[in-house]
Amino acid sequence: PGPPPPPPPPPASGAMSAFRRCAAALEKAEASAANWPEDLEIGAYDEVRNAHADLVEEAARFRARLAEVDPVTNEPRYGPNMKAKVEDWIARYEQLGDALDTHAAAADARRAEAAVLDAEASAAAAAAAEAQCAEAEAAHRARLAQTEEELARSRFGAQKFRDEDTPEPGADDAETRAALSAEAAAAKEERLAAEAAAAAEAEKRRTEREAARRAWQANAGSGVDAFKSHLADFAAAARADGGIAAPLRALHVVISNASRRPEAEAYKVLRCRNANFHRDLGQHDAARCCLAAVGYRLMVRREDPVEGVEEEPDEAELEAFQMAEPNPEVILGPLAEPAPAPPTRSA
């Protein structure tokens, strides 16, 4: 028998360097994923998700090379030690992908549950406000009636009902009744005039607010050019406030969710009074303009308070952004790209 075939050549230094880089990248992603809490939101692990996506081609290349055989020696491309390392790396890479999918599904479920609870709380708050307005209106009308009665009694004295034995009234009694009737009619007219004036003033304020919202909406514009212009302003404002990654990610998530699931009520309406919305987007006019450019409309969620409620609700309690007509040029253009990775420390 001839001499034994030579052992397969060791991997090239370039291949080994590529594997070491991939191993280091995977270890870094695994270390970040190991510290995730159970209630982690989907936007918080973008860095790990992007790192996992960057290794897709390398994982495919490693799988293909495991199946290759050297045409001269008819031996596997990888030696036993290198083969074990590559197989272990691929298994860990797939486990990390499963963990990412699990966290994404859990985050979606939590958001859906929060949307249901928020809708129930909003409905309860609206019902309570309506009941409070009705109670205040009834109390107001009761006070007006009492005031009218006291005014009539103070000026003309108490009137007593006559029974069958009471003699026919004289001229003085007829004059008193006429004066009382005239006074009551005047008080009623005064009350109705005051109510009409209050209603007109409320309608004027509502019209002015609506005109201001329409003017703002028209000034914000729509389409790709308007969106890009507002996005640049938003990025500059967020950077000036000390952080740009979270606000930009929030804008991307809001608009992407509305475009992918337009039928979901939780993504159609964005309440301006929501603390998270105000922190990431609402406090920046450029971000609100970005929402307008893709099809959101600024609107009032319920009518002004009824007559009798002296304190008017704050405008933030009434306004919301509602998706009216999604702009496909924006959603399928700049927003079709995946969410940008958080900037490095140097950026």
Image (cartoon, grey):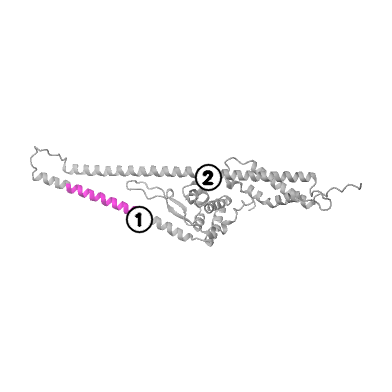
**Residue drawn at (34%, 54%) of the image:** 203
* Location of residue 255 with respect to 36 vertically, above or below: below
- The numbered disc on residue 111 is 2
How busy is the neighbourhood of tag 1: few (under 14 within 10 Å), some, or many (20 plus)? few
Q: Earlier in the sequence, mark 1 or mark 2?
A: 2
Q: Which residues are magenta?
A: 181-207
Q: Three-letter amino acid code at disc 1? A: Lys
**Residue drawn at (39%, 43%) of the image:** 127
Q: Residue furthest front?
A: 1
- The numbered disc on residue 204 is 1
Question: Label 1 to label 2, Cα distance in Å?
Answer: 39 Å
Instruction: Please tell me whether mark 1 sits on a helix, a strand or a loop.
Output: helix
- Please check the rendered image and state whether residue 205 is part of the magenta-colored stretch, yes or no: yes
Judged left or right of residue 39, residue 132 is left
Front tag of 1 and 2 = 2
| Residue 238 place in picture, x, y as percent | 55, 53
- Please check the rendered image and state whether residue 170 is part of the magenta-colored stretch, yes or no: no
Q: Three-letter amino acid code at disc 2? A: Arg
| Residue 19 place in picture, x, y as percent | 74, 49
| Residue 190 place in picture, x, y as percent | 24, 50
Query: Secondary structure of the magenta portion, mostly?
Result: helix
| Residue 175 place in picture, x, y as percent | 12, 47
